[in-house]
Image: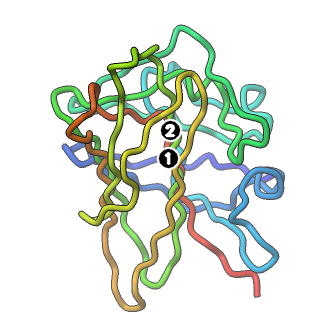
């Protein structure tokens, strides 16, 4: 099983930059839980971070696939939150994010948006997986709802994390051949949202063609 012991380089700004060395994703996890893997392509890990007030990196036995969820130092523009109750996973969940990862999250400290970014290589396809769970038992008149923008383009509208249940957004992005750029992801509360956005964990992979 391939390891992923590289160290992240974080540039903490209002827009959080994720930068990791690329390494091969674990074979068992690719076969079992990442449905974007096929006979013609594989995924190469770019970043996998566990947001919130985690005390350590998370891996086996918390993660049955021995994926390493790196501790992410929370910048001052974010606030740590955590759940006092375990987060559940639906049968057939495509990602199987460990409960120890989903139990922590971040939310904006003094804003209605969360933002992160990463630098893209030319002509490469990337998959970005964002993992969420609602920690609060919201009343019928309350909600947490947000839009997801990539480089200011609306990609997901009115997303609502499920209460104490792992929920996910998966997006693919591709930079044109000859163009190097940075992808900026912004989670912004909708006008009728009672609470700001949250995020529990982030994974980014590049696609490696096998044929």
Contact flag, marks 2 and 1 (Cβ < 8 Å): yes
**Viewer-proximal residue, 21 or 184?**
184
Question: Which one is in front, 154 or 17?
Answer: 154
Camera-nearest label, 2 or 1: 1
Tell me the CA gap for discs 2 and 1.
Answer: 6 Å
Q: Secondary structure at mark 2?
A: strand
User: Is 31 rendered above or below residue 195?
Assistant: below
Task: Report which residue position mark 2 lands on.
Answer: 201
What residue do we see at 70% from left, 57% from top? 25
Image color mode: rainbow
Residue 27: image quadrant is bottom right
Q: Residue 116 placed where, x, y %?
A: 32, 50
Q: Residues within 10 Å of mark 1 (few under 14, many from 20)?
A: some
Q: Residue at x 67, y 30 (%)?
A: 98
Please identify the residue farthest to the front as the structure is shown.
Answer: 140
Task: Work out which quarter of the rendered image holds the C terminus and state it.
Answer: bottom right
Work out whether 8 lies above or below 52: below
Q: Which residue is mark 1?
A: 130
Q: Earlier in the sequence, mark 2 or mark 1?
A: 1
Residue 123, percent from left and from top:
47, 84
106 left or right of 12 in image: right
What's the residue at 26%, 44% (across, down)? 188
- Please indicate whether residue 106 sits to the left or right of residue 115 in the image: right
């Amino acid at each position: 099983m391939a390891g992923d012991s590289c160290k992240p380089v974080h540039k903490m700004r209002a827009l959080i930059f994720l930068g990791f060395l690329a390494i091969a994703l674990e074979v068992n996890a690719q076969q079992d839980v990442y449905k974007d893997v096929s006979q013609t392509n594989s995924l190469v890990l770019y970043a996998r971070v566990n947001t919130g007030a985690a005390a350590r990196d998370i891996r086996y036995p918390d993660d049955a696939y021995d994926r390493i969820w790196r501790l992410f130092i929370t910048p001052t523009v974010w606030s740590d939150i955590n759940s006092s109750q375990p987060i559940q996973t639906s049968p057939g969940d495509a990602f199987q994010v460990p409960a120890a990862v989903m139990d922590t999250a971040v939310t904006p400290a003094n804003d209605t948006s969360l933002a992160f970014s990463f630098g893209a290589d030319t002509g490469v396809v990337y998959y970005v997986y964002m993992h969420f769970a609602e920690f609060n038992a919201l009343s019928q008149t309350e909600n947490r709802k947000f839009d997801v923008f990539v480089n200011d383009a609306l990609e997901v509208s009115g997303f609502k994390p499920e209460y104490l249940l792992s929920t996910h957004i998966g997006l693919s992005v591709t930079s044109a051949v000859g163009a190097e750029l940075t992808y900026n992801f912004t989670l912004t509360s909708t006008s009728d949202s009672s609470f700001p956005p949250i995020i529990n964990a982030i994974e980014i992979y590049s696609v490696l063609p096998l044929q």
